[in-house]
Amino acid sequence: MKVAVWNGISEADSVAGYVAALGMMIALEKNCNIILSSNYISNRMAHDCFSRRMLEDGIAHIPYCYLYGSPEYYSALWRMKRKRQDNILEIPMKGITIIFPPDMDEKSMFYYKSSSKNFYFLDMAKGSIAESKNVLDEAELVIVFLSQDKTEIQNFFERFSSLLSKAFFVIVDYQRDSLYTSRKISAEYGIKLNNIGIIYHNREFEKACEEGNLGQFIFQNLHRTMEEQNNRFIASLKKLARKIQMWGLSNDVEE
């Protein structure tokens, strides 16, 4: 299944950690093969969550994000690929294959040959609207990451109402006492409640992504631990993985 991942949070905030965590959870819980890619090159990408590159390069370095189609993107892609013979960037664990972002001569951003039974996640930078239409049209599912910010939510629904039939929404850093709860969004925009998932804020998860220890963090907390915040985070991630995997079977997900 081709899955476009839309960042509806902010241009300054990457969702790569969430994409990597979600892919890992689906691979573990549902025994699925996951392909991870992006239409941008930055210092905060999915493969960084499984390695120490970000930590070694310095988290405090000025963030950069080169969008598909820009000269900086192709220069950075060439530097990434110059010592590689194929399109696989990294295989951090069984069931997870991270591939290079698409090159300029690819006919599709979903260029990697993969079984339709696999989940092929393409993480899209927020500022790449002009280059995104073909991806959104080709995708069978669009996962939209949103905050509980009213303006960001309204902006998405005003600009991308045509995607609602194949969209699944993920509210990050979820707060139950916020004005925009999942039920509020469901009622206001006519979205099935089962097509909305949530992920709670977790500083240990963020730190694990920054230090390249995402795999270790999830394995350590996969079953109940003494840390209630970690238990809640993993439980929300598991539920999200189940809903998305079920979406692949039917658009009528059961709660």
Image (cartoon, grey):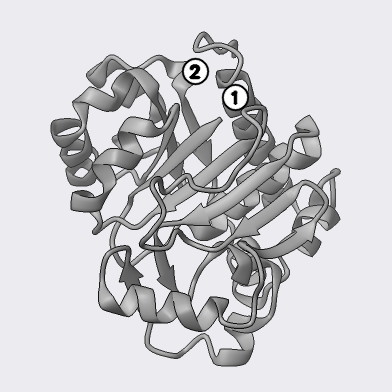
- Furthest residue toward left: 158
- Does residue 40 appear anywhere in the picture? yes
Relative height, residue 6 to residue 157 (above, below): below
On the rendered image, what quadrant is the C terminus found in? top right
Mark 2 residue crowding within 10 angstroms, few (<14) / some (14–19) / many (20+):
some
Asked whether the residues under the numbered discs 2 and 1 touch, taking CB atoms below 8 Å apart as contact, a structural biologist would say yes
Q: Earlier in the sequence, mark 2 or mark 1?
A: 2
Q: Is residue 208 above or below residue 93?
A: below
Q: Is residue 52 left or right of residue 129?
A: right
Q: Nearer the viewer, residue 193 or 75?
A: 75
Quadrant for the N terminus, please: top right
Using the image as rendered, state which of residue 33 and residue 61 is in the foreground: 33
* Closest to the observer, 155 or 78: 78
Please, what is the three-letter code of the amino acid marked with disc 1? Lys
Q: In the rendered image, which quarter is residue 105 located in?
A: bottom left
Give 235 or 58, whichever is nearer the viewer: 58
Mark 2 and mark 1: Cα distance apart in space: 8 Å
Q: Position of residue 228 (x, y in %)?
A: 73, 49
- Give the percent coordinates (x, y) of residue 249: 61, 15
Q: Residue at x 57, y 41 (%)?
A: 120
Q: Which mark is residue 63?
A: none
Q: Image check: 184 left or right of 198?
A: left
- The residue carrying mark 2 is 194
Secondary structure of the residue carrying tag 1 is helix
The quadrant in which residue 128 appears is bottom left
Question: Which residue carries the number 1 mark?
Answer: 243
* Residue lying at 66% horizontally and 71% vertically, measured from the top left: 85
Amino acid found under the numbered disc labelled 2? Asn
Tally the numbered discs: 2
- Image-based side of 204 in relation to 7, left or right: right
